[in-house]
Image (cartoon, grey):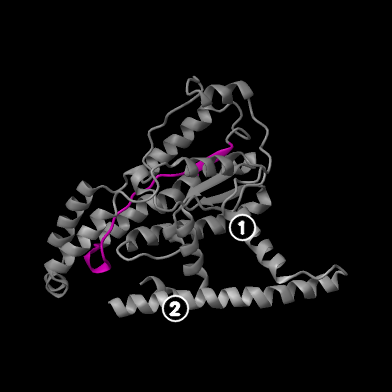
């Protein structure tokens, strides 16, 4: 194990050196070629590296560049909603897995809108559940249960409200996950559902472009500490269920000792990640009110953002070796 870790560290170091060399020599050459083509002065290696670094800082470390907000429909009402004391604020009981409850919610919204043709500006699909367990320990019922909420609930609610959103040229905001961009061991049921949300959102965005509807995806990183979506107690209950319901052959092949070590690692992961979900809420707000919302938002720590980029852009054999 130590030799593998050392090899990975050496490979990452070599990769960093290679990238530095390529940037140091290749990037200036390309920029100088472009500068000559435009009749501009040639640049130096130092200037190129500084420009690249500043670009990275602007993309990752600076606040979001303002892109304007849509016109507020009723400034006084919006102010009251911000203070959470508006009598226009309505709360609707909604199980996203129930066709009947979704239909009732649509009816309720229509009854409470002054102009049903243009008044529904946005739908935010944020309902979600999580679970864990290696594939051979995960039942088909678990796959269905997780996707019924995370994926089919998103599809069901979106389809139901889409006519109102389409007529208003409004917004659909779907909360996915960084796990919708890259797989993760012991999270196959969750990843499958979130990959589905990503694909559905892309297809919806393509179709709704002609109608003036903007579709955005929020891809949060690790917010376990902020959301308590998975706690040490829930891990213990789920772990007992996973082992109890696993086929005998799977129990014998994996072994109880290996299983317990894996569950201990899962429990230790429960309190990790960001403790404040404000960045997620800020991104959802921007997707709803910005004149030019982003296609995808990435509220996550820099190291998580970097991992997503490497996992989704490097050849699979290389990313597998680095991370698994």
In the picture, the disc for residue 3 is none
Horizontal and vertical percent position of residue 49: 66, 66
| Horizontal side, residue 260 vs residue 158: left or right | left
> Could you tell which of marks 1 and 2 lies nearer the N-terminus?
2
The residue beneath circle 2 is 11
In the picture, the disc for residue 206 is 1
Please tell me which residue is depicted at 63% across the width and 24% down the height of the picture.
75
Counting other residues with Cα less than 10 Å from the Cα at mark 2, is it few (<14), some (14-19), or many (20 or more)? some
Where, by quadrant of the figure, is residue 178 drawn? bottom left
Q: Quadrant of the N terminus?
A: bottom left
Please tell me which residue is depicted at 45% across the width and 58% down the height of the picture.
304
* Magenta stretch contains residue 6: no
Residue nearer the viewer, 202 or 158: 202
Distance in Å between CA atoms under marks 1 and 2: 40 Å
- Say whether marks 1 and 2 touch (CB < 8 Å): no
For the magenta stretch, what is the residue range?
121-139
Where, by quadrant of the figure, is residue 262 drawn? bottom left
Horizontal and vertical percent position of residue 295: 59, 53
| Label 1: which secondary element | helix
| Label 2: which secondary element | helix
């Amino acid at each position: 194990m130590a030799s593998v870790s050392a090899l990975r560290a050496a490979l990452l170091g070599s990769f960093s050196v290679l990238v530095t060399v390529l940037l140091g020599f290749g990037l200036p050459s390309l920029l100088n070629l472009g500068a000559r083509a435009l009749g501009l002065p040639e640049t130096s290696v130092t200037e190129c590296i500084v420009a690249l670094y500043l670009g990275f800082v602007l993309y990752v470390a600076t606040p979001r560049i303002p892109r304007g907000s849509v016109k507020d429909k009723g400034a006084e009402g919006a102010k009251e909603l911000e203070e959470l004391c508006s009598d226009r604020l309505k709360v609707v009981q909604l199980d996203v897995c129930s066709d009947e409850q979704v239909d009732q919610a649509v009816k309720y919204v229509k009854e409470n809108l002054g102009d049903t043709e243009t008044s529904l500006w946005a739908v935010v699909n944020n309902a979600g559940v999580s679970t864990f367990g290696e594939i051979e320990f995960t039942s088909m019922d678990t796959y269905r249960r997780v996707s019924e909420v995370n994926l089919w609930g998103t599809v069901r609610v979106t389809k139901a409200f889409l006519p109102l959103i389409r007529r208003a040229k409004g917004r659909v905001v779907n909360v996915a996950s960084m796990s919708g961009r890259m797989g993760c061991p012991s999270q196959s049921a969750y990843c499958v559902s979130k990959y589905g949300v990503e694909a559905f959102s892309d297809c919806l965005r393509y179709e709704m472009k002609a109608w003036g509807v903007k579709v955005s995806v929020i891809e949060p990183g690790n917010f376990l500490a902020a959301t308590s979506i998975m706690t040490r107690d829930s891990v213990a209950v789920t772990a007992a269920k996973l082992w109890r319901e696993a086929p005998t052959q799977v129990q014998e092949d994996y072994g109880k000792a290996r299983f317990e070590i894996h569950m201990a690692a899962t429990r230790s992961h429960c309190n990790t990640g960001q403790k404040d979900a404000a960045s997620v809420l800020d991104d959802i707000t921007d997707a709803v009110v910005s004149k030019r919302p982003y296609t995808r938002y990435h509220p996550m720590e820099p190291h998580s953002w970097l991992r997503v980029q490497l996992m989704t852009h490097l050849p699979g054999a290389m990313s597998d070796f680095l991370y698994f």
